[in-house]
Image (cartoon, rainbow, N blue to C red):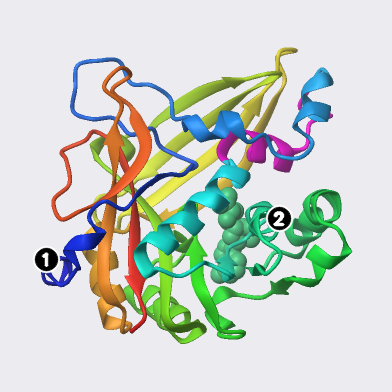
Amino acid sequence: MASSTATERSPTKTDTSERVTHEAPAKRPAAKKAPVAKKSPVAKKAPPVKKARAAKKALTARTADKHILYQMSVQAPAADSRAYARWFKKYTGRDLRAWREDFCGTSVLSCHHLLNHKDNTAVGVDFHRPTLDWGIKNNVNELLDDEQKKRLTLIESDVLKVTAPKVDCVLALNFSYQVFNTRQTLGKYFKQVYKSLKPGGVFYLDALGGPDVMQAKTDRTKHKGFTYHWEQRSFDPISHRFVCAIHFSFPDGTMKKNAFIYDWRMWTLPELLELMVEAGFDDAHVMWEGTDKETMSGNGIFRRKDVGDMDEAWISMVVGRKK
Ligand SMILES: C[S@@+](CC[C@H](N)C(=O)[O-])C[C@H]1O[C@@H](n2cnc3c(N)ncnc32)[C@H](O)[C@@H]1O
């Protein structure tokens, strides 16, 4: 249960906080100010490879590459990879060397983990061959030298089937595990992650919620040369089926509609914590995002909390440790 696992935690861990970047939605506390479209402060500091090249062109729906636009809109891999390493160090007292990124997509986050230290290794798992190939061409080959590439293993597979090699940390980010829409399947995934970890290993996944996220709406964020659209298409309160999509529009009026579509189950935090405990995880807990007093939006800083806030929209990290 969420409450019982939370009370097991060490009091020394309560100051664990860091900034990370997420796909959606904007955190919106229950306040009177107008909602601010999500954009983590770290995203501005860490443009992905190709940003400069892509931004110079006059982008149109025909010429723009959806993976580049995605990386520019929702990922800040340099800063985020370092943030996970710092979290891990604070939490375990050890350096994060061997990690696995499930649902790795274009592998850009794992590339940055490899750039961060000569002894770092990364395993990326994704079952979509074209996305893995795009990542090899545009991220792996652009960012890594031959030695760094040797420390990367990309596995084309369903994450439900992978338990080796054993790693210090597994990451499941940008809510991708929400493709699993039954308790049985998500529970199976968590058990596979547990088996994949070395003793003392840590599992990080992100979660979202709040009444704002359950409404049909589209948030738009302007970038240089294009606009990112996050559409919450439908939410079913009975099944928690949550369908959302990413579109990109361009100054010439063209639009890349449905560049990415997600058909997810929006899992609640107590469900995620309970499933982690059932899978064998110890010290399952939540890191809650703080609020920027100026913008009344999320500040990208996550701290361990037992009780959350009644935010209109929130993002949090769920953490479990293998004994
Ligand atoms: C939203 S993208 C996430 C990309 C990246 N992790 C990020 O943080 O932005 C989701 C990825 O998960 C992959 N995926 C979905 N279900 C999967 C499964 N069961 N096993 C492996 N990969 C899966 C898709 O192919 C896609 O590349």
- 64 inside magenta stretch: yes
- Image-quarter location of ligand 1: bottom right
What amino acid does circle 2 point to?
Leu
- Quarter where residue 175 is shown: bottom left
- What stretch of residues is rendered in magenta? 59-74
Q: Which mark is residue 15?
A: none
- Does ligand 1 reach within 8 Å of label 2's beta carbon? no
Q: Quadrant of residue 55?
A: top right
| Element marked by disc 2 | helix
Tag 2: Cα neighbours inside 10 Å, few (<14), some, or many (≥20)?
some
Q: Quadrant of residue 294?
A: top left
Question: Image point 19% across, 16% down: which residue?
Answer: 32
Residue positioned 38% across, 21% down in the render: 36
The answer to which of 1 and 66 lies nearer the viewer is 1
The type of residue carrying mark 1 is Ser
Q: Which residue is mark 2?
A: 115
Position of the C terminus, as image quadrant, is bottom left
- Please tell me which of labels 2 and 1 falls first in the chain: 1
* Quadrant in which the N terminus is drawn: bottom left
Coordinates of residue 174 in the picture (x, y in percent)? 49, 51
The correct choice, above or below, for 109 with respect to 230 in the image is below
In magenta segment, residue 150: no
The CA distance from mark 2 to mark 1 is: 38 Å
Query: Which of these two is toward me, 294 or 258?
Result: 294
Say which of marks 2 and 1 sits in front: 2
Tell me, for residue 3, which label it has, or none. 1
